[in-house]
């Protein structure tokens, strides 16, 4: 183990895996176990392997230089394995395709070259190191709390209380891991065969490179690979040659007009301050940015407690929609009564009322500015129940005024926490509006006035006709809700079925 740090220094000083190969042959010689007659044949084959592989290394059998005379060349590459762990059987299985192809082309008399790289850039290694650091910090906090409680435990012991509960060993799990139910990073490393003494070293992201890359080389060497190790590399700025090669590529592409600086929607890692690409994530692979259209509904009459905070600025309740073309069918707006909303300062002298999570996302899209604490600037916190009854001016709506009503099924982690209502097109919206129109006890419980939602004021606006479904007319949602006998906007399963019927036609 002690030699791996030295190998890392050797890497930087001598420029790569060729030096590591020579050092490993001295530091980690492989000797097949000589156990019994039962393994005699295997041991004999391993002896042949060792002898032949040593001969290949001494003769540079798989080292390829530019030929003196013109000769057909073949370059075979293998996707760089990511070095946040040891190489496994899946790597070996896939690698055989490249390995066999290289050997076959060489047997045809071609100059066949197989280099090999180790992928070390990206966020998984950094994220794993940060996760391990967090685990240790939380364990330290728990230890400090236990030390602070020790005098009380000693006093209790003096009073003759049950002493068997003290001094028992407890396996510790970080708060984050306990909440998520996932596997601790330290347990993941332990499952890889890394000792408890060595695990703390992996709090440094660079240690992952020093530890796993030499093992990757050693495993491939024992595999008998026909790799030209002089042309091996890692993909970080620890390897200045590969780093400059990538920089050259981007300069070339930029000069040709193929890439340019700018902004685009991306999944962003706030903690790391950089985009989080698909394969950089510990979970959520395949998830991309979801584009919504923001519907700004102006508050026509501000509550008294808002006026001082708002000043002469315009205040909007903002809703996120995937169907902006239906907005002229708005009849009202919904919020979650128990949801926590905020008045957030945005650009252009505007204030948005929405969930804090959505305000944070909008600030990262330049709709607003983050404060010194890297959070959106919240002027006031309000509960959803305090928004009920607000008169709004909705863009493109048929009605001059629409009112805020409760919806008990809103998710505060989706969209903005504010839902604009188009009951002609949305089964959820129709079912919820109908509940407030027909359930007097609900209106009394949530403080909803009948004039905010009655059938005369909130008449459904016909908007879309589905040619393949003439029975739907120009308002599909009411027809489907009645057909499926949906009783309330709490009937989630039936409403999910209704949405499939309406939206997939």
Image: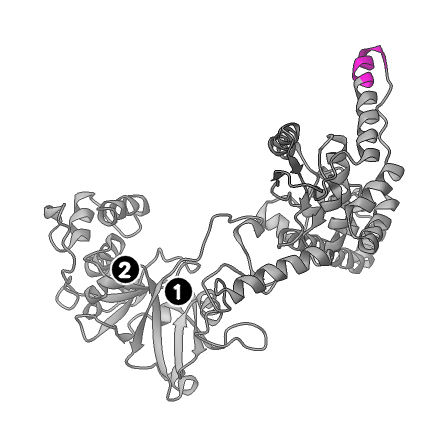
Q: Which residue is mark 1?
A: 416
Query: What SS does tag 2 mark?
Result: loop
Query: What SS does tag 1 mark?
Result: loop
At 21% from the left and 75% from the top, the residue drawn is 401
Q: Residues within 10 Å of mark 2 (few under 14, many from 20)?
A: few
> Can residue 269 be seen in this snapshot?
no
At 16% from the left and 60% from the top, the residue drawn is 463
At 65% from the left and 36% from the top, the residue drawn is 112
Q: Nearer the viewer, residue 152 or 304?
A: 304
Left or right: where 424 falls relative to 270: left
Left or right: where 189 falls relative to 439: right
Q: Do callouts 2 and 1 mark residues in contact (Cβ within 8 Å)?
A: no
Left or right: where 383 falls relative to 215: left
> Can residue 234 be seen in this snapshot?
yes
Q: Position of residue 381 (x, y in %)?
A: 46, 74
Q: Which residue range is magenta in the image?
A: 36-44
Q: Position of residue 368 (x, y in %)?
A: 46, 76
Dot 2 or dot 1, earlier in sequence: 2
* Cα distance in 3D space between marks 2 and 1: 15 Å
> Residue 55 has which mark?
none
Left or right: where 28 falls relative to 478: right
Place residue 236 in its image quadrant.
bottom right
Q: Is residue 42 magenta?
A: yes
Q: Is residue 286 magenta?
A: no
**The N terminus lies in which quarter of the figure?**
top right
The figure's colour scheme reads one colour
Q: Position of residue 211 (x, y in %)?
A: 77, 46
> Residue 323 has which mark?
2
Place residue 72 in its image quadrant.
top right
Q: Residue furthest front?
A: 69
């Amino acid at each position: 183990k002690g030699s791996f740090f030295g190998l890392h220094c050797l890497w930087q000083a001598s420029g790569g895996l060729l030096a590591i190969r020579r050092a490993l042959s001295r530091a980690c010689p492989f000797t097949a176990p000589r156990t019994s007659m039962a393994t005699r044949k295997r041991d004999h084959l391993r002896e042949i392997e060792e002898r032949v592989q040593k001969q290949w290394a001494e003769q540079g059998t798989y080292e390829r230089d530019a030929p003196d005379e013109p000769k057909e060349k073949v370059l075979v590459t293998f996707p760089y394995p990511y070095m946040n762990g040891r190489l496994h059987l899946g790597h070996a299985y896939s690698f055989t395709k490249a390995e066999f192809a290289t050997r076959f082309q060489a047997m045809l008399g071609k100059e066949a070259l197989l280099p090999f790289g180790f992928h070390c850039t990206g966020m998984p290694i950094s994220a794993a190191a940060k996760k391990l650091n967090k685990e240790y910090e939380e364990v330290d906090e728990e230890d400090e709390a236990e030390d602070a409680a020790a005098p009380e435990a000693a006093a209790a012991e003096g009073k003759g209380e049950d002493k068997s509960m003290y001094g028992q060993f407890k396996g510790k799990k970080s708060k984050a891991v306990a909440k998520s139910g996932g596997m601790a990073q330290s347990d993941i490393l332990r499952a890889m065969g890394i000792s408890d003494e060595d695990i703390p070293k992996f709090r440094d992201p660079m240690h992952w490179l020093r530890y796993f890359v030499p093992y990757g080389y050693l495993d491939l060497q024992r595999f008998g690979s026909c790799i030209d190790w002089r042309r091996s590399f890692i993909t970080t700025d620890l390897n200045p040659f590969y780093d400059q090669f990538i920089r050259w590529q981007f300069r070339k592409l930029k000069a040709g007009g193929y890439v340019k600086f700018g902004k685009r929607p991306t999944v962003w890692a706030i903690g790391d301050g950089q985009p989080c690409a698909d394969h950089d994530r510990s979970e959520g692979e395949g998830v991309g940015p979801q584009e919504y259209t923001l519907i700004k509904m102006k508050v026509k009459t501000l509550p008294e407690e808002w006026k001082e905070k708002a000043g002469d600025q315009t205040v909007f309740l903002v809703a996120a929609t995937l169907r902006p073309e239906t907005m002229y069918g708005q009849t009202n707006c919904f919020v979650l009564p128990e949801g926590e909303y905020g008045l957030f300062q945005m650009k252009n002298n505007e204030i948005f009322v929405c969930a804090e999570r959505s305000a944070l996302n909008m600030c990262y899209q330049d709709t607003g500015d983050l404060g010194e604490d890297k959070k959106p600037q919240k002027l006031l916190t309000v509960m959803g129940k305090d928004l009920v009854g607000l008169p709004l001016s909705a863009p493109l709506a048929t009605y001059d005024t629409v009112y805020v009503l409760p919806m008990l099924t809103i998710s505060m982690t989706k969209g903005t926490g504010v839902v604009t209502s188009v009951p002609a097109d949305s089964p959820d919206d129709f079912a919820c509006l109908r509940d407030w129109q027909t359930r007097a006890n609900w209106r009394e419980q949530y403080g909803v006035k009948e004039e905010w939602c009655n059938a005369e004021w909130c008449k459904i606006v016909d908007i879309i006709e589905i040619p393949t479904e003439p029975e739907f007319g120009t308002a599909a949602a009411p027809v489907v809700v009645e057909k499926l006998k949906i009783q309330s906007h709490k009937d989630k399963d039936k409403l999910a079925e209704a949405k499939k019927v309406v939206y997939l036609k």
